[in-house]
Image: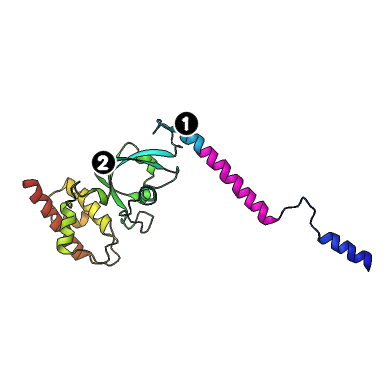
Amino acid sequence: MGDSDDNDHKLNEAPPTTISRRDLIKGVIAGGVTVSSASYLFRATSLLGQSGQSTGERLLTINVNGQLRRADVMRQETLAWTLRHKLGLTGTKLGCDRAECGSCTVLINDIPHYACSVLTHMVRDRKVLTIEGLASPEGKLHPVQQGVIDEQGFQCAFCMPGFIMASVGFLKTNPNPTRGELAFGVSGNLCRCQDYDKILTALMRGAENMRRASNV
């Protein structure tokens, strides 16, 4: 019995060089972070001043609301994610994240696009306009924004930025639309409160504001 107990005790003792599973995982994570960080710093240094030359580049300069903004962007990263989480422009809402609801609509070279379905790398040589960039530098609201306020056109307003951006883009091509034409122009945007009649009234007021402003 004594020998058996001694053997059992020896079997249960970990060799001096054995490390725990927890320590092993911590070591792997720490090592991975170190390698990733070193690789990133090396790439960042080598890519400074070479924006736009490689599709695998992470540090990008993009034109957003008339300003050149620098961001660390993954190759598969969407514009919606970059705007919200890298540049702090949270007016671009993430709803369905599959190009169906339109809440993330922004203008790219004056054309409405779903930001959730556009990769950030694709807009390096283009101009991006978000809801934050509509007002004048002095703080005066865009005519469509003012129309929404005048008519109190939204209920929860989660979808509001997308509707406004889609409307602004459409009005650039058709500044004097009928109600039906404007409804078609923003038909790619959904409202979960389903208050479409009120939304359309507000956007029509915005179109009227734009025409009035252009005649001043």
Q: Main secondary structure of the magenta part?
A: helix
Placement of 9 over or under 142, stated as above or below? below
10 Å crowding of disc 1: few (<14), some (14-19), many (20+): few
- Spot the residue most to the front: 16
Q: Position of residue 196 (x, y in %)?
A: 22, 64
* Secondary element at tag 1: helix
Query: Is residue 143 in sight in this rendering?
Result: yes
Q: Is residue 37 magenta?
A: yes
Amino acid type at image mark 2: Gly
Q: Secondary structure at mark 2?
A: loop
Between 138 and 105, the residue placed more toward the observer is 138
Which kind of residue does numbered mark 1 sit on?
Ser
The x, y position of residue 44, in whole percent, is: 46, 36
Residue at position x 89%, y 63% in the image: 6
Which residue is disc 1 drawn over?
A: 46
Magenta-colored span: 20-40
- Residue lying at 33% horizontally and 56% vertically, measured from the top left: 93
For the residue pair 6 and 182, the one nearer the viewer reads as 6
Identify the residue shown where x is 42% and y is 43%.
73
Q: Is residue 74 left or right of residue 19?
A: left
Q: Which residue in the structure is indicated by mark 2?
A: 66
Q: Earlier in the sequence, mark 1 or mark 2?
A: 1
Q: Quadrant of the N terminus?
A: bottom right
Q: Is residue 92 left or right of residue 152?
A: right
